[in-house]
C-alpha cells in the first residue's frame, strides 16, 4: 500500500474528479443517456421526457456543463447541449491507463 494518502491528485486527475462528481447523480446520468450520437438537445426537450421540472433540469445541465461533460451553445434564445465526447474519452482513458500501469 502507498502511504501518502494526503498527496495531491495528479493534474490529469483533477478534471476527472469533477466529471465523476457530476456523473454521481442518477438524474444527470439519465440526462446523459438521452442523447443520441451527435445529437443536440435543449432544456425544453430534456424536461419534456424527464420527471424533473424545467428549472431542475437546467440546474443539472449547468453541473454537467461546468464539469465539461456537456458542451453548449446559445442560438437565439435557446441553449443547445451536446456530449463532450473528447472530455469523457480522456477521463475514462486516464482511469484505464492508471489501471493498466499500476494493477
Image (cartoon, rainbow, N blue to C red):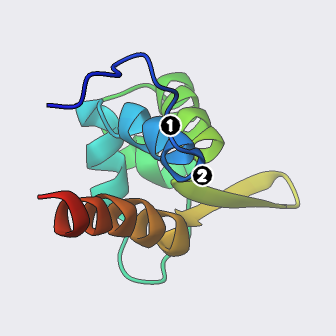
- Give residue 98's quadrant in the image: bottom left
- Observer-nearest residue: 51 or 86? 86
The residues tagged by marks 2 and 1 sit, at their Cα atoms, a distance apart of 8 Å
CB-based contact (under 8 Å), mark 2 and mark 1: yes
Q: Residues within 10 Å of mark 1 (few under 14, many from 20)?
A: some
Q: Which residue is mark 1?
A: 18
**How far across and how far down the image is residue 20, in percent?**
36, 40
Q: Residue furthest top?
A: 6
In the displayed structure, would residue 26 be above or below residue 96?
A: above
In the displayed structure, would residue 89 be above or below residue 5?
A: below
Q: Which residue is mark 2?
A: 68
In the displayed structure, would residue 50 be above or below residue 31?
A: above
- Give residue 75's quadrant in the image: bottom right
| Secondary structure under the numbered disc 2 in the rendered image | loop
Residue at image x 51%, y 54%? 69
Of the two numbered discs 2 and 1 in the rendering, the one whose residue sits closer to the viewer = 1
Left or right of 65 on screen, residue 72 = right
Left or right of 48 on screen, residue 80 = right
Amino acid at each position: 500500500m502507498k502511504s501518502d494518502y494526503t498527496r495531491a491528485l495528479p493534474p490529469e486527475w483533477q478534471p476527472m474528479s469533477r466529471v465523476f462528481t457530476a456523473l454521481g447523480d442518477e438524474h444527470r446520468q439519465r440526462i446523459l443517456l438521452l442523447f443520441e450520437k451527435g445529437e443536440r438537445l435543449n432544456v425544453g426537450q430534456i424536461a419534456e421526457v424527464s420527471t424533473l421540472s424545467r428549472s431542475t433540469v437546467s440546474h443539472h445541465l449547468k453541473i454537467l456543463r461546468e464539469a465539461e461533460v456537456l458542451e453548449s451553445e446559445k442560438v437565439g434564445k435557446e441553449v443547445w447541449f451536446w456530449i463532450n465526447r473528447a472530455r469523457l474519452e480522456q477521463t475514462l482513458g486516464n482511469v484505464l491507463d492508471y489501471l493498466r500501469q499500476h494493477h
